[in-house]
Amino acid sequence: MASKVRVNQDLQRERDRANFNLEQLTYIFDGSREYTQKRRYLEKRIAEDPELKGGPNYYFLSNSEKYANGVRKATLLAKKLKEYKLGDFTDAFLLRSIIFPNEASPMSLQIDMFIPGIMGLGTEEQQRRWGEKAMAYEIIGTYAQTELGHGTHLRGLETTATYDPTTHEFVLHSPTLTSIKWWPGGLGKTTNHAIVMAMLYTRGKCHGLHAFMVQTRDLETHEPLPGVEVGDIGPKMGYHTVDNGYLRLDHLHIPRMNMLMKNSQVLEDGTYVRKKSDKLSYGTMLFVRSTIVKGVATNALAQAATIAVRYSAVRRQSELKPGGVEPQVLDYVTQQYKLFPVISQAYAFSAVGLHLRNLYLRLNYDIQQGNVELLAEIHSLTCGLKAFSTDQMMWSVEICRLSCGGHGFSQASGLPKIYDVHVPACTYEGENTVLYLQCGRSLVKALLQAQKGVTLSGSMAYLSQVCDDKCSVTSQVTVDALLKSYEWRARRAVHKAARMYKGRLQAGEADYNAWNQTGVHLVLAAKAHCHKYVLKTFAESIQQAEAGADVVRVLQQLCLLYATHGVTTNSGQFLECGFMDTRQLELVNDHMLRLLTDIRPNAVALVDAFDFTDDKLCSVLGRYDGQVYENLYKWARQSSRNETQVRIFTTVTPQ
Ligand SMILES: CCC/C=C/C(=O)SCCNC(=O)CCNC(=O)[C@H](O)C(C)(C)COP(=O)([O-])OP(=O)([O-])OC[C@H]1O[C@@H](n2cnc3c(N)ncnc32)[C@H](O)[C@@H]1OP(=O)([O-])[O-]
Ligand SMILES: Cc1cc2nc3c(=O)[nH]c(=O)nc-3n(C[C@H](O)[C@H](O)[C@H](O)COP(=O)(O)OP(=O)(O)OC[C@H]3O[C@@H](n4cnc5c(N)ncnc54)[C@H](O)[C@@H]3O)c2cc1C
């Protein structure tokens, strides 16, 4: 990678003592050797591409400049996809992640939701009509669902699409202030099309939420079309490269065939033909949720860990041994306790994200065959795992930032940028609490079914199993033994929520109120279920890994760290379920501390194996060569505030 660079000696020493095959671990993290090779090939091409290399320093741009630069790069992304002959969907995601390092593209919805929406919800003819143009970036689109008044409660959305059988058109309308579409990425200024989710009315009856293809702007002049009002919603906490927008429709007429009709249709005379499941309209969200674990949470965790671990190997501070040299801060066990669990989370979520992609592909295949059996379970699982992984990511990125002391607060660290762009994932594609509740409710409902004699299968099968054995943790702490404890904790949490819900019903409470009052326990149950699922999937992925014994050994250490850290940070719940006792908890805690020592010699190599380029990390602290101080100094000198020695302030006029 960086063979000719002058590497900081501490960092070099760390790399020299690594004792596993780093390359193999990279393939596992990426999902395959082929993917790694393709990624590196594209990274090199982009780094050498005269139109893309260099460019302005993101950190010193204003929000408007960030957007303008984002549009420039998004246009180049479209051009490079053709130039490099990359037609495949995965390639488009990959190229975008290289051109937009920890930045959202103003055209990101094109591949995140617009094209998946057309493919998932449109007929074959509609896929040909818009899909091909969208793949070629001849039309630029977004996904407009959320409104000013409602984002979570989809049945409460107010935009209407009323079919007129005399003209064979739908009339799309925003009837109230709260029905104005609000938030869609790229809607404000960049896009010229949108998949608009609206309540379908035909023959005087409402048939719920459906998807409609709406052209918002003229393809030549880019002016909004008559009946369309669009704009930007203003500055946000982050996401400065994206023009999240609003859209107000005023009796906009669109042809009947602009309704995406793969799953249900409106015939010429206005007859509504039902689909197999009314939840198929939510398919685009399910797809995106399934990609967030790997594409957002894992990515952010791995990058934050890389920056913080490399910097902690370079940073020397205080005195460990009285009178001795200042140690690398990575030698403080408290620093290891902050950072090594984050490394383990990144590898764990990577395994889960790859697994979830396969599950989604299976579901998609089944749906094409007309089989929606798996839909409910995969909906529940993707809801839970999207929320669990992004929650964890949010806390861990912040831990990484704090672990870098003062320099972590500087944009130069790259950590605020990671936080800015990835933390909105806790809200978009379903607010996390709401998604935990979806998952928790489905677990309780499954358990109640099991109590009536139904055999549970898939990820919920363990709920109905009777296990009366005791926790087998001894001085030998193993993943297998801990996995049983995770199962116990999750099973107990679901049972507790179910008991509470049933108890309230029996006490005469209304069903809706019983669910609401059980909410906190439903969330706890969903979290415990997802935690167990992640550990199990991570452990199974190691068993299946095509790797040498050295790589398997470090992965097993990380898996055990993930498991022991999860027990110690949720000890109350593990003890509460009565499966594990305090003596065993102490053993787990001791083992976790020993693992920190075991992992220490490989810490830098474990983050190097994530294989991020410096261009991707955009971090002075996380540089591969570890030359942090001279580059922090260089970086600060670029600040526009240093252009003059005596600053002349422009007056800000109060409005
Ligand atoms: C990249 C960045 C760009 C960002 C873009 C965005 O943010 S775009 C905007 C992103 N916006 C959001 O993400 C909005 C978040 N909100 C939502 O997704 C929905 O409103 C909801 C799921 C919370 C509730 O939906 P609801 O009120 O219609 O449902 P209900 O609660 O009445 O439950 C009825 C039954 O249906 C089940 N079921 C539900 N969904 C699915 C499904 N997909 N599949 C299968 N099943 C599903 C549910 O489990 C329940 O089953 P049960 O118990 O009867 O066996
Ligand atoms: C950066 C970003 C990009 C986005 N991009 C898009 C896009 O491209 N297209 C699009 O359509 N939308 C987009 N959104 C909107 C996003 O999907 C919604 O904001 C999200 O679904 C949450 O809905 P809400 O804002 O209505 O939150 P609310 O539901 O109002 O949440 C507020 C609080 O109420 C609680 N709450 C709400 N309902 C319940 C319930 N039933 N039970 C318990 N608690 C509840 C929540 O937990 C939360 O604490 C984007 C949002 C962001 C931040």
Image (cartoon, helix red, strand yellow):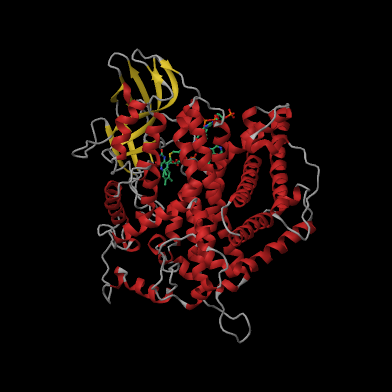
User: From the viewer's perspective, is 351 left or right of 92?
Assistant: right
Q: Give coordinates of residue 430: x percent, y percent.
A: 49, 40
Q: Nearer the viewer, residue 437 or 262?
A: 262
Q: Give coordinates of residue 222: x percent, y percent.
A: 22, 40
Q: How many numbered circles are shown?
A: 0
Judged from this view, the residue extending furthest toward the left is 221
Q: Quadrant of residue 380?
A: top right
Q: Nearer the viewer, residue 328 or 455?
A: 455
- Does 526 appear above or below 625? above
The quadrant of the rendering that contains the N terminus is bottom left
- Does 446 appear above or below 593? above
Q: Give coordinates of residue 79: x percent, y percent.
A: 26, 48
User: From the viewer's perspective, is 6 left or right of 447?
Assistant: left
Q: What residue sits 48% from the left and 70% below the top?
A: 406
Q: Nearer the viewer, residue 551 or 626?
A: 551
Q: Quadrant of residue 475?
A: bottom right
Q: Give coordinates of residue 196: x percent, y percent.
A: 36, 32
- Does 403 appear above or below 276? below
Residue 173 visible in the snapshot: no
Residue 551 visible in the snapshot: yes
Q: What residue sits 61% from the left and 47% below the top?
A: 537
